[in-house]
Amino acid sequence: MNDLFALDFDGVICNSADETAVSAWRAASQLWPTLAMPGSDAPDDIVEQFRTVRPYLEIGYQAIVMIRMLVEKAPINAFRDDLHQHVDQALRELGKNKDDLITLFGAVRDEWIRTDLPAWLDRHSFYPGVIDALRAALRQNKRLYILTTKQERFVAAIFNSQHLPFPTNLIWGLDRKVKKEVLLADLLKENDVRVHFVEDRLDTLLAVHHNPALQNVQLYFAPWGYGTPTECAQAEQHPDIHCLSIDRFTSWLKK
């Protein structure tokens, strides 16, 4: 049986919290120009606060609303428990839908990349040893896929900045408009394959675990990502989720 590795991007390979905060700030300032947002870039304190609430972000466009919530000093439980309600309310107030915010978020990033690619790239960092491990895995022709809620062109640009020749057709992102469970089901259709799914969002792993069609997917939690201490503890106690260390993860890709 052949091993196939399906890897999340943000929180497993790349830490993009700061870039997400700045891009979301720029997008929010277009939607709410009177929202006490001086200047073109997010203040350092907003970026720092966003790092704290980043674990509750599911899809990138929600960060636009999260920035507004931070400016309005929403409590942490609003992000943890009620984010979807806040997003839905903002969409109703704006007369927009989520695709509108996705388009805006992508356009803001595209403009940043067009005008100052080095600054955009500089807002990203990589978890220790992961890029080298991916490079080694590609050299060994290991089967790798990226499953992400990020738009695919941005993942490709980030990989290109590291001179990592990751095939773009194996980056499955937000552009496909389907959940990761559907993408995993597609991977399982291949004959004689064992799928290993590495993700830092516990709710996503639990959704896969509860899907009978995905019972053969091996599940791995990445505690070095955006997960909360509570989620890390829950993952460690779950009988069907393997809690990886980053050293084990990188060694696993290299061997």
Image (tube, helix red, strand yellow):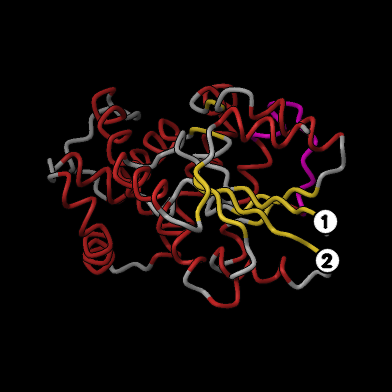
Instruction: Name the residue: 64% across, 67% down.
Output: 216
Horizontally, is 185 left or right of 54 in the view? right
Q: Are marks 2 and 1 in contact (CB under 8 Å)?
A: yes
> Identity of the amino acid at label 1?
Asn
Of residue 235 and residue 228, the one placed in the foreground of this image is 235
Residue 129 in view here: yes
Residue 107 in view here: no
How many residues crowd around disc 2 within 10 Å: few (fewer than 14), some, or many (20 or more)?
few
Q: Quadrant of the N terminus?
A: bottom right
Horizontally, is 230 left or right of 76 in the view? right
> Identity of the amino acid at label 2?
Asp
Horizontally, is 118 left or right of 102 in the view? right
Of residue 220 and residue 183, the one placed in the foreground of this image is 220
Q: Earlier in the sequence, mark 2 or mark 1?
A: 1
Instruction: Name the residue: 71% across, 30% down.
Output: 133
Which residues are the magenta region? 158-169
> Which quadrant of the view contains residue 160?
top right
Magenta-span inclusion, residue 159: yes
Of residue 190 and residue 183, the one placed in the foreground of this image is 190
State the image coordinates of residue 48 (x, y, percent, origin top left): 29, 27
Report, in whole angstroms, how far the alpha carbon at label 2 lies from the one at label 1. Answer: 6 Å
Instruction: Name the residue: 63% across, 42% down.
Output: 155
Instruction: Name the residue: 23% across, 52% down.
Output: 80
Magenta-span inclusion, residue 106: no
- Is 10 rendered above or below residue 193? above
The residue identified by callout 1 is 2
Horizontally, is 146 left or right of 15 in the view? right
State the image coordinates of residue 81 (x, y, percent, origin top left): 21, 57
> Which quadrant of the view contains residue 246?
top right
- Labelled disc at residue 192: 2
